[in-house]
Amino acid sequence: MAMEINTEDYQICYDPATATVSFIGSLRLSGPAEYAPIGQLLAQVADLEPTKITLNLQQLEFLNSSGINMLSKFIIEIRKTARVQMAVQGSQSIAWHGKSLRNFQRLMPGLQLDFL
Amino acid sequence: MLEEQPSREQLLLEIERLRQQVEDLKEEKADLEILLETTAEHSDTVETELRSRAFEAVREGEIKLAQFLEAIPVGVVVLDSQGKPYYVNHAGQQLLGQGVLPLNSVEDLSESYQIYIAGTETIYPFENLPLVRALRGENATADDLEIHRTDKKVPLEIWGRPIFDDGGKVAFAIAVFQDVTERKEAEADRHLFIKKLFDLNQNLEKSLDAESDLTDAYGRFVPHQFLNLLGYESIIDVHLGDQVQQEMSVLFADIRDFTTLSETMTPQENFKFINAYLSRMEPAITSNNGFIDKYIGDAIMALFSDFADDAVKAGIAMLNILKTYNEYRQGVGYVPIQIGIGINSGSLMLGTVGGKNRMDSTVISDAVNLASRIEGLTKDYGVPLLISQQTLERLRNPTDYAIRIVDKVQVKGKSQYVVVYEVFDADPPESLSAKLANLSVYNEAMLLCERKEFREAGKLFEECLRTNPSDHVARIYLKRCRDWRSLLKGI
């Protein structure tokens, strides 16, 4: 079970203790096909069915359109299970976080959004 | 056949199912709308962010570049492809005296910025400006330009370079230029310096030539060889009281009856004669490794280091030259002259004597006095060349020469006798062969004389004279023998 993806541009890892998936670096993969591995990691986390999944995006400097698309779809999936709660952590100092992450609450009204 | 009619419950279930489907689809549609909006908004946000970052970076880059250009201590000018001034850095403005000027065309560049050909009042032709040549795609340099400012003229060196775009066309021309006043001044200084050095060198050469001439001139008055013997290179180094002792041969030569001869001539004729004679005799000495120590009127005193042979050969040479000279004299109606030469060898002391203000060289030795005496004897015996026993002993090979004994002299203050010999190599051929033929008879006669057997001696001398009537020595001895016989008889 791959709970970690490490590349030069970005690192993604899952911490079971806190059920937190952390995203670090810049994500600018071109298209759903390239985001598939990350999508799979997220799906695996969802399968574990923790009470609450936290997405830690505090150190995610950059995310392209395909990326936000993928994350958005993930959130919809979690909403559909209706068994897992969702929390997203953003950064006050990264410009696009404020605007773009709020849309996640539109997709899943109960989603907990914090800017740290 | 009966058509199966769906039951009411089935229909209701179907309706319910379809209603649920509609709900689901509505939800999905809502989700998709949100997704679309989210993605679009995110894209916009990110694009704005990136754009402003790009601008920021470009601006920073431009600022840095401008800083660099401004900091460069040489002038930088950039023209666009149309030749319009695009940028002039701070240093450039300082040098040009002004910044970017609105120009109508490239042709006005020289005029507008007051660029002239260095050292003239001619405007620099614009097509030769490195900047203009750069516009044509050339790398160019020039260092013959001057900017005429109101207060001064500034010499410049300019480099021009084109900047090409991707298509290979000239996009910009950049010129870098600097004030080369200092360098030009340094060059001028250098030229001046080189000229000074050259002049100095010329003067030095002249001085050296003069010194060389002077040294040569000195040498004619004080022979180099004399100085060398004293251990000096230059006459300047010589001190009063310097001396050296050396084994040498000394030659004295004198003209017979010169006083009588000179009385027949005017002082000018005397002078001319002496110089004619001495200048003929000098080579005989110098070509035999000797040097003339002094002239005393018509007399010559010459010195020879080491080899007695040199002195004897010199004496013989002098006599041969005399023969030719006498033929010439008789040819022009002058009386022929006779000379006498005396040679002795021994230890001589050479040195400087005199006072601080007037020094002269001198040779002091008994040997010198003896040589002089021997020279005097030439007159008595009527032979031109006499040498001492010491000289004979120092000859490498006495048999090379025609030599016979002539006399014995007592040296003043000493009890010893010195034997004196005649060297007759220069005799006229008949005399030479006659003397040689008589040599054994002559020698025996001299021996008998020694033993005081005057009668027998006399007979042998008579025999010599029969075959050689001109043998003066034999004649003198014959008379002596007769005189001594009569003297003895008288007792």
Image (tube, coloured by chain):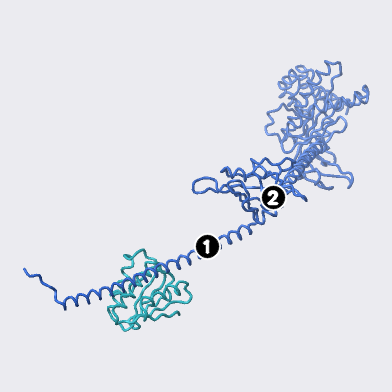
Quarter placement of the N terminus of chain B: bottom left
> In the rendered view, would you say B16 is above or below B314?
below
Question: Which of the labelled discs sits on residue A95, or is there none?
Answer: none
Which sits in the foreground, B189 or A22?
A22
Q: Residues within 10 Å of mark 2 (few under 14, many from 20)?
A: some
SS label for mark 2? loop
Question: Which of the labelled discs sits on residue B55, or is there none?
Answer: 1
Q: Amino acid at mark 2?
A: Val
Which sits in the foreground, A69 or B76?
A69
Residue B60 pos. (x, y %): 56, 63
Total marks drawn? 2
Q: Is there one chain holding both mark 1 and mark 2?
A: yes
Mark 1 or mark 2, which has the lower sequence index?
A: 1
Q: Gap in Å between the C-alphas at discs 1 and 2? A: 40 Å
* Colour for chain B in the figure: blue
One can see residue B456 in this view:
no
One can see residue B408 in this view:
yes
Residue at which label 2 appears: B180
Which quadrant would residue B359 be assigned to in this image? top right
> In the rendered view, would you say B285 is above or below B38?
above
Identify the residue at horizontal 31%, vertical 69% (top origin): A37
Q: Amino acid at mark 1?
A: Phe
Which quadrant would residue A115 be assigned to in this image? bottom left
Q: Nearer the viewer, mark 1 or mark 2?
A: 1
Q: Which chain is cyan?
A: A
